[in-house]
Image (tube, helix red, strand yellow):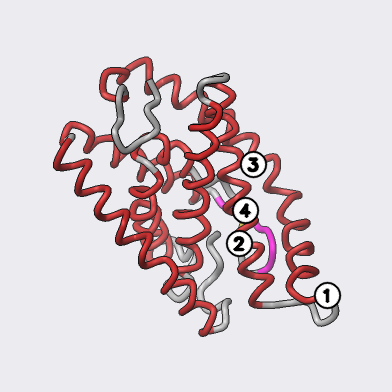
Amino acid sequence: MHIAEGFLPPAHAAGWAALALPFVAVGLGSIKRILRQHPERKPLLGVAGAYAFVLSALKLPSVTGSSSHPTGVGIGALLVGPAAMSVLGMVVLLFQALLLAHGGLSTLGANVISMAVVGPGVAFAVFRLLRSWSFPTAVFLSAALGNLATYLTTATQLALAFPDPHSGWIGAFAKFAGIYALTQVPLAVGEGVLSVLMVNVLLAHNAPQLRGLSEGGKLA
């Protein structure tokens, strides 16, 4: 995620922005329902957004035109649901583009799809599939695989925009994904471990608030 300002061709940037809009619209509806039905969960929205902002601001140089870093969206998907994270992720990306020159406005749609839609969606699905098997493992894999899914999406976006002259977008994807793997695999493992620790802290101090989340991951 965090493809730099002006890096994508205008048609690609516009296409990803158009694709992101329906997800953001659904996310706004999800947040409205959470606030209307469970106003006491408003702090969870703040925690999810702040956590994603801090972790995803810790960038490391990676493929030209992009960066590698934790995403922080996995925990948010478990706390408030993947739909709400599409909006929170968009806000995080917007502030980072404006305040930190991290990402860009023209590439906001592409970055929203990778970090605020695909990443949380994969994290939430993995957790729901595995939570009855092993809770710590489910949290770890949801955060780690959500992180990797984000970067595979970014690699796809870059490959579609800049296909290899000989092998097309598939060859370009292999190149981008291979370079990302050098930094992103250890970062995904680290984010998975950190997420387990973070969830344990939240459950230790806010277990009643986390039980029975109607639009989140039902952590407890």
The quadrant in which residue 170 appears is: bottom right
Is mark 4 in CB contact (under 8 Å) with mark 3? yes
Q: Residue at x 65, y 58 (%)?
A: 61
Give coordinates of residue 49: x percent, y percent: 35, 45
Q: Which residue is labeled 4 in the image?
A: 68
Question: Going from the N terminus, do you reach mark 4 or mark 2 first?
Answer: 4
Q: Is residue 142 above or below residue 56?
A: above
Q: Is residue 187 above or below residue 22?
A: above
Q: Work out how far the residue at label 2 is from the one at label 3, CA to CA, in angstroms.
A: 16 Å
Residue situated furthest right in the rendering = 166
Q: Which residue is labeled 1 in the image?
A: 167
Q: Work out how far the residue at label 2 is from the one at label 1, CA to CA, in angstroms.
A: 19 Å
Our reading of the magenta stretch's main secondary structure is loop
Q: Which residue is labeled 2 in the image?
A: 154
Q: State which region is magenta.
A: 59-64
The quadrant in which residue 75 appears is: top left
Give coordinates of residue 126: x percent, y percent: 55, 36
Q: Which residue is labeled 3 in the image?
A: 187
Question: Going from the N terminus, do you reach mark 4 or mark 3 first?
Answer: 4
